[in-house]
């Protein structure tokens, strides 16, 4: 990482220099760690949109090119050639597994999929109609009360145990939240099934008969997991890192990430997209809603189009569109009302000069909600699926942070705009 260039800041006649750091890809950054000491000033960057909060070698996004890399590999190639656990291994270890490593890792994860039996009783403390994300925040946070024998995070083996437990147990916890909502009995994991097929077994199986996962549907959900595994320093990932910077245990950190992801501005986009399609209702009303989306005085927003990071197209959307077609064909739903509506909406939006100019292209959420609905997953579970997949990225980012020799507890500064210093008046003098 080069630091040959410098940036110069002149203030009050005083000139100070700061090194410019150059990464593998992306924008260079000015190292301002000594800014306060040199100038007595701090920077103001609401939302941290121009601030690199860390050095990371995990994920890279080029929004202008529409590029997403996991450890240098394009997301398109990983989704096509690898399963989710191979991607999880890659994110955690930096390289894809060979055949022996793949079998060992998958076996290790299978051996950790069950949860402590007493943990299942936590679910009974929630109302049956509790949002599954609320349940997940509580249950994942409670894992540290059951698995506390490997909490020396300076020890690589202890970290590995915690990482493996989280990756393995999230599908079980998510499936149990769904079963609790529906009043069905919990289904124990099956070690003869692979990661995603086992999750579908726990979601949709019952004790009445053996559940046989459809390989096309399993592959579709596995791709969804891969596409959502990590996404650089987004709000929930930054939350996990900030929580972890205090030395908090990884179960608490992941619980904090789940809570952040639950926010409608972050993880609820595919659910919002599906709700929008339901609101539009029929292909005949698409033109009406397109006009509303262009009206600045109308509160209606076209969900599933455009992205805060990707300025041309979302590379995950192309993959998700293909998966969407495969799933609907497999289930005989090519003429599904919502899918036909979505395709018409996509066609018009991509041809309309207003949307083309503003680069409001379909994103991954536009298709993933349709796929999950076709798989039988209710909208209330969409963000849980997101959290399940993103746990791999979160825990990888957590481990990268706490093993960084430069890591410090997070402590953002502020620009104080409140009342100036003043004395407390006596009770009789107060207005």
Image (cartoon, rainbow, N blue to C red):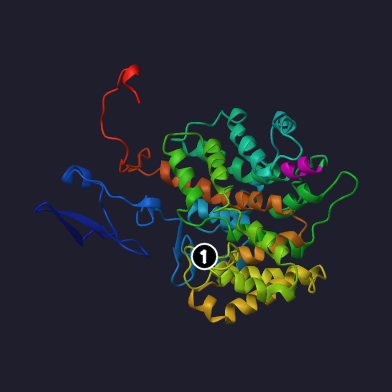
Observer able to see residue 354:
yes
Front-most of residues 92 and 104: 92
Find the residue positioned furthest to the left: 13
Residue in the image at 71% along x and 67% along y: 280
Q: State left or right for residue 209 relative to residue 12.
A: right
Tag count in the figure? 1
Any magenta on residue 178? yes
Q: Quadrant of residue 131?
A: top right
- Quadrant including the N terminus: bottom left
Q: Residue 163 lies in magenta, yes or no? A: no
Instruction: Identify the residue shown where x is 22% and y is 47%.
Output: 35
Query: Residue 188: in sight, yes or no?
Result: no
Q: Nearer the viewer, residue 188 or 428?
A: 428
**Which quadrant: the C terminus?**
top left
In the rendered structure, the answer to whether residue 278 lies left or right of residue 162 reads right
Q: Is residue 367 above or below residue 94?
A: below
Vertical placement of residue 224 versus 317, above or below: above
Q: Residue 235: x, y in percent?
A: 48, 50
Task: Read off the magenta span.
Answer: 176-182
- Front-most of 222 and 66? 66
The crowding category of the residue bearing disc 1, from other C-alpha atoms within 10 Å (few below 14, some 14 to 19, many at least 20), is some
> What residue is shown with label 1?
307
Majority SS type along the magenta span = helix
Measured as percent of width and height from the top left, residue 43 is found at: 28, 50
Which residue extends farthest right?
208
Q: Answer with the quarter of the image where residue 111 lies.
A: top right
Q: Is residue 16 left or right of residue 135?
A: left
Q: Position of residue 412 (x, y in %)?
A: 35, 42
In the rendered image, residue 252, in percent from the top left (x then y), is placed at 54, 36
Report helix, strand or loop for mark 1: loop
């Amino acid at each position: 990482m080069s630091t040959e260039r410098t940036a110069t800041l002149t203030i009050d006649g005083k000139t100070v220099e700061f090194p410019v750091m150059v990464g593998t890809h992306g924008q260079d950054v000015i190292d301002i760690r000594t800014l306060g000491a040199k100038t007595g000033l701090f920077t103001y960057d609401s939302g941290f949109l121009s601030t690199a909060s860390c050095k990371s070698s995990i994920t890279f996004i080029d929004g202008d090119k529409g590029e997403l890399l996991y450890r240098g590999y394009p997301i398109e190639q990983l989704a096509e050639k690898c399963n989710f656990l191979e991607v999880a291994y890659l994110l955690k270890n930096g390289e894809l597994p060979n055949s022996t490593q793949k079998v060992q890792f998958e076996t290790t994860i299978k051996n950790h999929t069950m949860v402590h039996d007493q943990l299942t009783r936590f679910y009974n403390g929630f109302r049956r109609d509790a949002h599954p994300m609320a349940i997940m925040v509580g249950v994942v946070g409670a894992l540290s009360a059951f698995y506390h024998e490997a909490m020396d995070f300076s020890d690589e083996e202890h970290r590995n145990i915690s990482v493996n437990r989280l990756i393995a147990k999230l599908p079980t916890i998510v499936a149990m939240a769904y079963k609790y909502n529906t009043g069905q009995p919990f289904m124990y994991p099956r070690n003869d099934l692979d990661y995603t097929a086992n999750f579908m077994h726990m979601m949709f199986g019952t004790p009445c008969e053996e559940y046989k996962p459809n390989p096309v549907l399993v592959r579709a959900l596995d791709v969804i997991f891969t596409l959502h595994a990590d996404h650089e320093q987004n709000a929930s990932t930054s939350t996990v890192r900030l929580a972890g910077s205090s030395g908090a245990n990884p179960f608490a950190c992941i619980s904090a990430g789940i809570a952040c992801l639950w926010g409608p501005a972050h993880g609820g986009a595919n659910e919002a997209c599906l709700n929008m399609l339901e609101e539009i209702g029929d292909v005949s009303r698409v033109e009406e809603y397109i006009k509303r989306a262009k009206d600045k005085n109308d509160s209606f927003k076209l969900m599933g189009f455009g992205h805060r990071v990707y300025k041309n197209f979302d590379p995950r959307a192309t993959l998700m569109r293909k998966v969407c077609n495969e799933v609907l064909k497999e289930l005989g739903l090519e003429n599904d009302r919502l899918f036909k509506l979505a395709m018409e909406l996509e066609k018009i939006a991509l041809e309309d000069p207003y949307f083309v100019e503003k680069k409001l292209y379909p994103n991954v959420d536009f298709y993933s909600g349709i796929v999950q609905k076709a798989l039988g997953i209710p909208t209330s579970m969409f963000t849980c699926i997101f959290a399940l997949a993103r746990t791999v990225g979160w825990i990888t980012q957590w481990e990268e942070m706490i093993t960084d020799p430069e890591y410090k507890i997070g402590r953002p500064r502020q620009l104080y705009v409140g009342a100036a210093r003043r004395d407390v008046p006596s009770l009789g003098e107060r207005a």
